[in-house]
Amino acid sequence: MSKDNNKKMKQRIIVIQVLMVSCLFLLGAKSFDVQIFKAKDLARKAENDYSRYIEVKGERGQILDRGMNKLATSIDAVSITACPSKIEDPKAVAKKLSSILGLNHKKLIETLSSQRMFAWVARRISPDQAKQIRQLNLNGIYFENDSKRFYPNRNLAAQVIGFTGNEDSGLEGLEFKYNSVLEGSSVKVRIKQDGNGGILDLDKKRRDELKGKSIVLTIDKKIQFLSEQTLERTVKNHQAKSGMVLVMRPQTGELLSIAHFPEFNPNNFKEFDREIFRNRAVTDAFEPGSAMKVFTAAAALENGFAPKSIFFCENGTYKIGTFTIHDTHPYDWLSINQIIKFSSNIGAAKIVETIGDKALYNYLVSFGFGEKTLIGSPGETSGNLIPYRKWSKIDASAISFGQGISVSAIQLLSAISAIANDGNLMKPMLVKKIVSNTGEDLQEFHPEILRRIISSKTARQVKNMMSLVVTQEGTGVKAAMEGYTVCGKTGTAQKALKGQKGYSKDKYISVFTGFAPQENPELAMLVVIDEPKKQYYGGDVAAPAFKTIMAESFNYLNIPPEKDKPMIALLTTGEKN
């Protein structure tokens, strides 16, 4: 080989060597730059591709009855997530998912068209929806464990408990009122994903720690069921519009039952009319009719009258100004005992004329009418009791027998319970305690006496009057129970016309309220039936339901019969007022 060729070969080798060394140097420099200077940024980018911060919310706390039976709880559910970058045809996938989940098609396309590695599609879907989506076997769509609100007793106490929405936040009832207590705590945590976007690890322990508190109610599941069962039968038998039953322990103010009909299933509340959702025992006011006469009588006794004090009842017709008051049967002279037993409107009016408007008003206010009970259920009404200075000539008389005044069911039962409770008004209780997610009692609520309204003597006298109502010839004879002395009062109120003055001639509210046994009342109860057909007297419509629920509740609670107390009344005539 010539010298020139050797020289050229050596030059080529040197160039190649220089190039190789340069490449190695550049690779080393790049590697140094990547591993040292850009390591954190690249690691963060890789981490973001396969992990993401999401808000983890603890499971919602439970709602329990007084026996710790579950009324509202949370169950395992499925949520749908997506890895949009793995979805080849977002429009086709969005179309299939939106038809099953009922989601907005355009918004879903936007979600699935991004290049993200993770996106929420739907939270807490139904098992049927999950099954349909699984069968589609869609690439980039994943199923994650979640929890969903569930009401194991379906319709039971639905208006009291309420329900939650899509985000598991309370929308109605106690679910709404105690949402901040029940909802779990939330925290942002980093979750890791596999190459397809599926979640690899969710901190289950963290979820358990974030679980919400539970509330224990005073409601008794069994008595609630008995109340709802009898109420439904009563409303249907009388072709009524609706009905309510409330059961209370008069000595403590604890509500054992708040029943409504019609009812609804909170598990699928969207299928029902919103009108049914509210707890009408708290939110709605109505004219109670003759049930108010017991409070008129109590005011008279407190103002110096005796149970045997007599009033002339005008033989059934009494004019006050331009108004005329009627009794169903004509009576001449009646004692206060008899005015309550026979439910005389004129007798009640005569009592108020004697004691005065101010005295009646003050006692009604003391019994809790015209103000909220603060029971702790949303939307409570205060009813309507006009100040006595604004009463017209007829107002005092009308209010004395339950017209021209509106009350809530919880007000009326609390007032009746005060008579049963020796004259002491208790604050009504619906929540017994709040419990931590570990089962520890955090806050307990105890019976609270609001005030003494009437003396023990007056309370005993009014009890006796109310027991006469449930005897032969009394208006509430159909509430009589064998072995127990029942104290009660009927009410039949014409409904006020909507948007105009006056009362309907064919729409009534039928009421029976009372307690038993007389000497040591264990339970107080109110039955309200709205717009019954054909029969409408409280003694015919509401009193039998009272008897059935009271008897079955006594049997369940093992309350023994009173000694030497056979049933006093025969089931003869019903109420006439």
Image: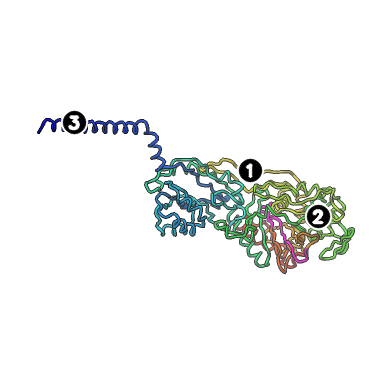
On the rendered image, what quadrant is the C terminus found in? Answer: bottom right
20 to 221, vertically: above or below: above
Q: Position of residue 425 (x, y in %)?
A: 72, 47
Query: What is the three-letter code of the residue carrying label 1?
Result: His
Q: What residue appears at the point 64 percent right and 51 percent down from the top-left corner?
A: 255
Q: Quadrant of the N terminus?
A: top left
Counting residues from the start of the chain, the first of labels 3 and 2 encountered is: 3
Corner quadrant of residue 262? bottom right
**Mark 3 falls on what kind of element?**
helix
Distance of label 2 from label 1 (alpha carbons)? 34 Å
Q: Which of disc 1 and disc 3 is earlier in sequence?
A: 3
**Residue that mark 3 sits on:** 11
The colour scheme of the drawn protein is rainbow
The residue wearing badge 2 is 399
Query: 273 and 318: which one is in front?
Result: 273
Element type at marker 2? helix
Image: magenta residue range: 504-526
Mark 1 is surrounded, within 10 Å at the Cα level, by few (under 14), some (14 to 19) or many (20 or more) other residues, namely some
Residue type beneath disc 2: Ile
Query: Which residue sits at x=44%, y=58%?
Result: 92
Q: CA distance from mark 3 to mark 2?
A: 121 Å
* Residue furthest to the bottom: 534
In terms of depth relative to the viewer, which is nearer, 395 or 424? 395
84 falls in the magenta region: no
Q: Which residue is mark 1?
A: 446
**The image quarter in which residue 478 lies:** bottom right
Q: Which residue is rendered at x = 13% and y = 31% of the image?
A: 6
- Residue 493 appearing in the image: no
Mark 3: give few (<14), some (14-19) or many (20+) Cα within 10 Å: few
Identify whether 535 is placed above or below 115: below
